[in-house]
Image: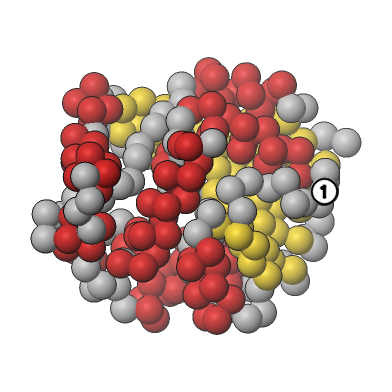
Amino acid sequence: MRSTLLHSRDWEELAAMDPLWAILSDPEKRFGKWQLEEFFRNGAEEIAQLMEKAGKLGLPRTKRRAIDFGCGVGRLTRAMRDHFPECHGVDISSSMVETARRLSPACEFRQAANLESFTAGWADFIYSTMVLQHQPDPASAARIIKDMLRVLAPGGLLVFQMPAHMKWRNRLQLRRRAYRLLHGLGLPHTFLYQRLKLNPIRMIALPQAEVEKIVAGEGGRVLKIEYIGDMKTAYLSGVYFCTKQA
């Protein structure tokens, strides 16, 4: 419970300080340098490319409802509206959700840390990128993957990104630890972020074999995996394309 509360607090603070960079962490865009039009255009391009790949898989079979898990201010949620008549964004930060509602009124947004508010088989398409890697621990990420498969409709498509490997030095996350320590001692988060250039963003990983086991255990099937990075870089991530049979 404490880890969840701290996780929520971290993202509320990021939402107040630099919400666009917190979602899309380009080093050159830190400290409010993202332009909103460019930010949303980036999301539209990402979803267009993703739907082209989905089309080659012949999925989802039905295009009714889509979920963007970890939506932030709705960068990808609003882009999904070009492909699905009903699009829902879910984010742990109430501030992010409030901004998303204001910027993309054609979509629905929910403040939550999971998908418990959705019934089984509700969504034809679920997408989550650069979100599971920031959960409090690997067990939390595993629970979310299971829940996304529960909510996925038979013949639907679930696509999520998850680091499979981190170099040992990146596991230390000294800047995040310093942020948490100094914040606990009473230093304001704005000072830590803006002056000391620290941030609370956590990075975790799940081995590919473990992810595949989770998907299979929930009645899903991994159709393909696209890799980002390699074993020589700081992070090796997999983008998992999954479906579920009736």
Above or below: residue 21 compared with residue 224: below
Question: Please, what is the three-letter code of the amino acid marked with disc 1?
Answer: Thr
Q: Is residue 239 visible to us here? A: no
Let me know if residue 122 appears in the view: yes
Label 1 Cα crowd, 10 Å radius (few <14 / some 14-19 / many 20+): few
Its colouring scheme is secondary structure
Which corner quadrant of the image does residue 83 belong to?
Answer: bottom right
Residue sticking out furthest to the left: 195
Residue located at (19% from left, 53% from top): 187
Give whichever of 227, 52 is nearer the camera.
227
Q: What quarter of the picture does the C terminus occupy?
A: top right
Q: Quadrant of the N terminus?
A: top right
Q: How many marks?
A: 1
Q: Is residue 71 left or right of residue 28?
A: right
Assign a secondary structure to mark 1: loop
Identify residue for label 1.
119
Q: Residue at x 50, y 41 (%)?
A: 4
Residue 33 placed where, x, y %? Answer: 24, 73
Q: Nearer the viewer, residue 242 or 5?
A: 5
Q: Is residue 199 above or below residue 215?
A: below
**Residue sitting nearer the eye, 6 or 221:** 6
Residue 121 in the figure: left or right of residue 184: right
Q: Nearest the camera: 163 or 44?
A: 163
Q: Residue at x 68, y 41 (%)?
A: 148
- Could you say where residue 93 lies in the image, as x and y percent from the top left? 50, 59
The percent position of residue 55, horizontal first and vertical second, equals 66, 54
Horizontal side of 54 relative to 230 (left or right) equals right
In the picture provided, is 191 more to the left or to the right than 167?
left
Query: What is the x, y in percent for residue 173?
Result: 24, 34
Q: Residue at x 71, y 21 (%)?
A: 217
Q: Residue furthest right?
A: 246
